[in-house]
Image (cartoon, rainbow, N blue to C red):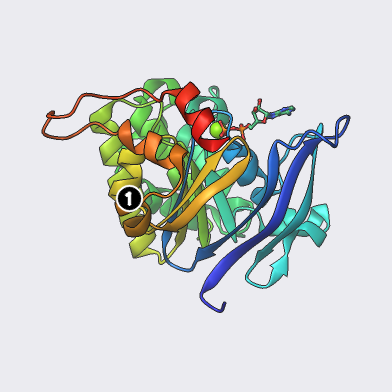
């Protein structure tokens, strides 16, 4: 379909030394242009491997099959050099723990500058201007430009990662549990920021989470993953109103009720196993 920016077809991810062990099992999904799609599932369900496959950043012990078509181009067929030319510019990604992606001995201004330089040839003065502009966009005071990552809060560090991710104007932004390590109020601010950037820069967003509460807040479409498979997908309205799969129902039962009327139900895995068969 023309309004799909990305189409994954029959993606499998498996260890090189054990090709029969499918960590991601034959999944197919499409991302609608300009929309936010959430992949939701518990830890170990294959969400990150799916994202890393799109970025062509799987670790060298892993291999994949299937196709990943971005704006009509199958990324799987591209050379490493072609992928490098596109990564960050077409598709960019932010990760759960910014501290592992940021270099502790370099200032945030320098690191944002390096991200811009990957795809842009700017003069020093223009670069500085662009760094300040990006800091403004993500809500970090420009006088923090010479700060080191450990001088910032967790939320600010994630804002730096977001600045780097959008520095080359990607059309698809992948966010892999970007708020999981943050406390609840900061989580909400980062979600708001991502949502407003998505609208402002007309990006498509693939947002990965294990939290259905987040899905309710930001998703247009939902993909539910369970043990490497997609068990359900559709619009957020449909999936939240009428979940079909037992795992989706179990996940939804874990979302806290804002009025606090409902007790939190942990997932009952033995019942779930019986239901799934
Ligand atoms: N390099 C690897 N080698 C072998 N197994 C891996 C590797 N990376 C991830 N896995 C396994 O693949 C499964 C899916 O991982 P992942 O996509 O990171 O899950 P999620 O992001 O949903 O928590 C997990 O069981 C994980 O242990
Ligand atoms: Mg993950």
Q: In which quarter of the image is residue 129?
A: bottom left
Considering only vertical position in the picture, is 103 above or below 133?
above
Q: 227 or 206, which lies in front?
A: 227
x and y, in percent, of residue 142 in the image: 32, 41
The residue depicted at 86 percent of the width and 34 percent of the height is: 16
Considering only vertical position in the picture, is 154 above or below 122?
above
* Secondary structure of the residue carrying numbered label 1: helix
Visible residue check, residue 167 = no
Quadrant of the image for the C terminus? top right
Considering only vertical position in the picture, is 38 above or below 184?
below
Q: Mark 1 points at which residue?
A: 240
The residue depicted at 81 percent of the width and 31 percent of the height is: 61
x and y, in percent, of residue 235 in the image: 39, 60
x and y, in percent, of residue 218 in the image: 32, 51
Quadrant of the image for the N terminus? bottom right
x and y, in percent, of residue 39 in the image: 49, 46
Q: 90 or 273, which lies in front?
A: 273
Visible residue check, residue 36 = yes
| Disc 1 residue: CB within 8 Å of ligand 1 | no
- The extreme bottom residue here reads 2
The residue carrying pointer 1 sits among few (fewer than 14), some (14 to 19) or many (20 or more) residues within 10 Å by Cα, namely some
Q: 106 or 99, which lies in front?
A: 99
């Amino acid at each position: 379909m023309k309004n799909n920016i990305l189409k994954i077809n029959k993606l499998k991810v498996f260890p090189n030394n054990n090709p029969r062990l499918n960590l991601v099992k034959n999944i197919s999904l499409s991302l609608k242009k300009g929309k936010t799609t959430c992949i939701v599932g518990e830890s170990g369900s294959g969400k990150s491997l799916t994202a890393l496959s799109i970025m062509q950043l799987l670790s060298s012990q892993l291999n994949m099959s299937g196709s990943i078509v971005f704006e009509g181009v199958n990324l799987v067929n591209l050379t490493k050099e072609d992928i490098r030319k596109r990564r960050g510019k077409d598709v960019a990604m932010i990760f759960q723990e910014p501290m592992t992606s940021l270099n502790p001995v370099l200032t945030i201004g320098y690191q944002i500058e390096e991200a811009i330089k990957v795809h842009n040839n700017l003069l020093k003065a223009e670069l500085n201007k662009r760094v300040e502009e990006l800091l403004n966009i993500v809500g970090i005071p420009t006088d923090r430009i010479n700060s080191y990552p450990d001088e910032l809060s967790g939320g600010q560090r994630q804002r730096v990662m977001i600045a780097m991710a959008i520095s080359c104007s990607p059309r698809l932004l992948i966010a892999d549990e970007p708020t999981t390590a943050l406390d609840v109020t900061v989580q909400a601010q980062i979600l708001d920021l991502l949502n407003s950037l998505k609208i402002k820069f007309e990006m498509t967003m693939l947002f990965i989470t294990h939290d259905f509460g987040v899905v309710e807040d930001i998703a247009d479409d939902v993909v539910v993953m369970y043990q490497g498979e997609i068990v359900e997908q559709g619009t957020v309205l449909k999936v939240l109103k009428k979940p079909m799969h037992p795992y989706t129902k179990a996940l939804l039962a874990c979302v806290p009720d804002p009025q606090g009327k409902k007790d939190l139900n942990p997932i009952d895995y033995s019942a779930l196993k019986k239901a799934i068969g």
